[in-house]
Image: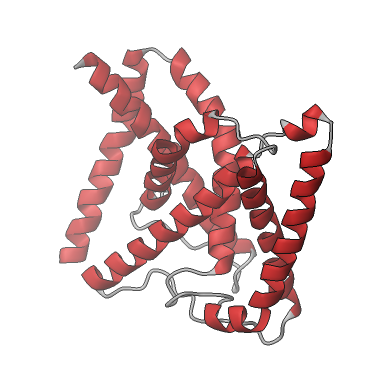
Amino acid sequence: MKRFLEKFSDYYIIFCVYALIGWLYEVLWMWFVVPPHHFINRGVLFGPFLPIYGFGLLILLLLLGRFMKKKHPASNPIYTSISLFVIITFIYTTIIEYTTTPKILSVVEYLKNYGLGLILTNIIIIVLVNMFIKKTKNKKIKKFDTTIFLVFLLIWIITTVIEYVSHFAIDKATGNLLWDYTKDFLNINARVNWDASRNFAIGGTLLLYTIQPLLEKLLLKLKSNYKLIITLVIGIPMLIDFIFHTVLKLI
């Protein structure tokens, strides 16, 4: 039981940290990037947290934790090819986003107009780089760890799926659209778009490789009793907030 409570406390604290970070990201984004540039509480509750970010990062940790610890050397053509595909596609599509007017909203339209160029660019660069790595005698290049690029791609896919499913579920359950990407670059049914997915991939990668190791070290140093106290101090107000918010919605 004690072991269960400690594990639960660890995951709950991690959940709360990322739910807070997600809230800060959304608020700052709406304040400084999206007109009319003023404070908007982006939380679904009253408190400064967005649960979807907390759950999202927990899902990423559970799915990618072991994968991140393994090394995927550049000497393996598969890892190099996928890594290059991620980098090239990221750069290529970002250039298209900021150079086309009016912006392309449909993924189908994007592939129709620029898909062939993207494919050819990827093929040429991937083949040349793989040939170079195969012939080079430099061991550092051959052993170069491509894991972070693979993680970046996986986070991109996973967070996009999470956002799409969340939007679909909320839409069908309540009829409310918490976000609408209808007018945004490369959106799919207004539920997900290029900018949001790209930002989640960048943010998720940064968090998993910077904040998460520090958070894990901190949790290892904290005694079980302190973790439980922190969980209760944060958890009880959050539960009250949830109940109060739900009641208000029903009234």
Pick the front one: 15 or 72: 72
Please give left or right for residue 198 compared with residue 227 in the image.
Answer: right
Please give left or right for residue 240 compared with residue 142 in the image.
Answer: left
The answer, for residue 24, to whether it is visible in the render is no
Pick the front one: 81 or 43: 81
Q: Measuring from the top left, give residue 99's x and y in whole percent.
A: 76, 78
Question: The N terminus appears in which quarter of the rendering?
Answer: top left
Pick the front one: 100 or 216: 100
Colour theme: secondary structure
The answer, for residue 107, to whether it is visible in the render is yes
Name the residue located 59 percent from the left edge and 76 percent from the top edge: 185
Please give left or right for residue 251 compared with residue 122 in the image.
Answer: left
Question: The C terminus appears in which quarter of the rendering?
Answer: bottom left
Q: Measuring from the top left, give residue 176's x and y in whole percent.
A: 31, 73
Q: Measuring from the top left, give residue 151's x and y in whole percent.
A: 55, 44
Name the residue located 53 percent from the left edge and 34 percent from the top edge: 68
Name the residue located 65 percent from the left edge and 83 percent from the top edge: 113
Name the residue located 78 percent from the left edge and 48 percent from the top edge: 131
Q: In this view, does 139 lie above or below 45?
A: above
Q: Which image quadrant is residue 13 in?
A: top left
| Count of labels in the image | 0
